[in-house]
Amino acid sequence: MRQEAFAVIWDVDGTLVDTAEMHFDAWVRLANEMGRPFFREDFSATFGRRNPEIIRFLFHQEFTDREVQDIGERKETYYRSEAVKGIELLPGVNALLKTFAELGVRQAIGSSAPRGNLDLILRLTESSPFFQAIVGMEDTQRGKPDPEVFLVAAERLGVPPNRCVVFEDAIAGVQAAKAGGMKCVAVTFVGHHSKEKLQEAGADRVVRSFDDISADDVLAML
């Protein structure tokens, strides 16, 4: 008898790895070039969202889709030039990836980041073999807190949403997971949002790092 499938969907920035300062510096550089300061408040307000939404939020201008794409790619070029110097998985991540793989739990990436960023991170951390699906910015039309990114990931894994647990660190991501009918574990290690705020957003469990939760704990949520 075939065992019913379970799946874990990982956000990336702030969850799988900590690349926040690299993104912040890239946005500062881009915004300065476009004649606008970029503050920590801007970063907090947009973290976890897709570039098209961030760009229109920041600059309040009418851009064509091609202009948005070009501006976003310029920012990501700045980011990748720093990221390539070295990225490591956050505490507890590698152990969970390996254990889920051993248990036959399907795993996917569900991120607002462009595919080029995701491929770079997975290559640098040597974690590509753990994932059966990768969903990024180009695969969606709507950003978090809309659940589209996680629903697409679940569909590609062939697992119903109610059999999925999402790992997140951002309020918008937690909201997206819950809107998609999934369980959500939120992590505060990078510190973008407090435990209280993540709980208010609907997280089923909040941990400081992934050292504080086991694969059995995650599967018990389902």
Image: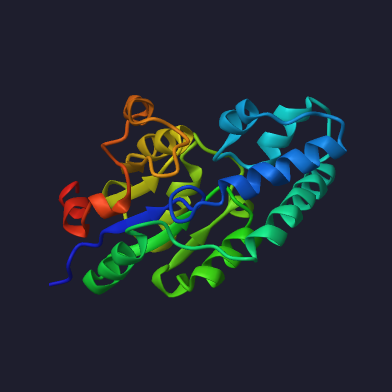
In the rendered structure, the answer to whether residue 123 lies left or right of residue 173 reads: right
**Residue found at x 19% / y 48%:** 222
* 211 and 13: which is toward the camera: 211
147 left or right, relative to 103: right
Of 101 and 96, which appears nearest the observer? 96
Image location of residue 187, percent across then percent down: 36, 43
Looking at this view, is 3 or 81 the one in front? 81
Q: How many marks?
A: 0
Q: Find the residue positioned furthest to the left.
A: 1
Where's the N terminus, which quadrant?
A: bottom left
Establish if 156 lies above or below 57.
Answer: below
Q: Position of residue 176 (x, y in %)?
A: 44, 37
Res. 114 image quadrant: bottom right
Q: How is the image coloured?
A: rainbow
Q: Is 216 situated left or right of 206 in this image?
A: left
| Residue shown at the point (45%, 43%) measured from the top left | 190
Place residue 203 in its image quadrant: top left
The part of the image, by quadrant, that contains residue 94 is bottom left
Compared to residue 215, the image places residue 161 above or below, namely above
On the image, the x and y values in percent for residue 7 come to: 31, 58
Percent position (x, y) of residue 41?
A: 61, 26
Question: What residue sits 82% from the left and 49% below the top?
Answer: 70
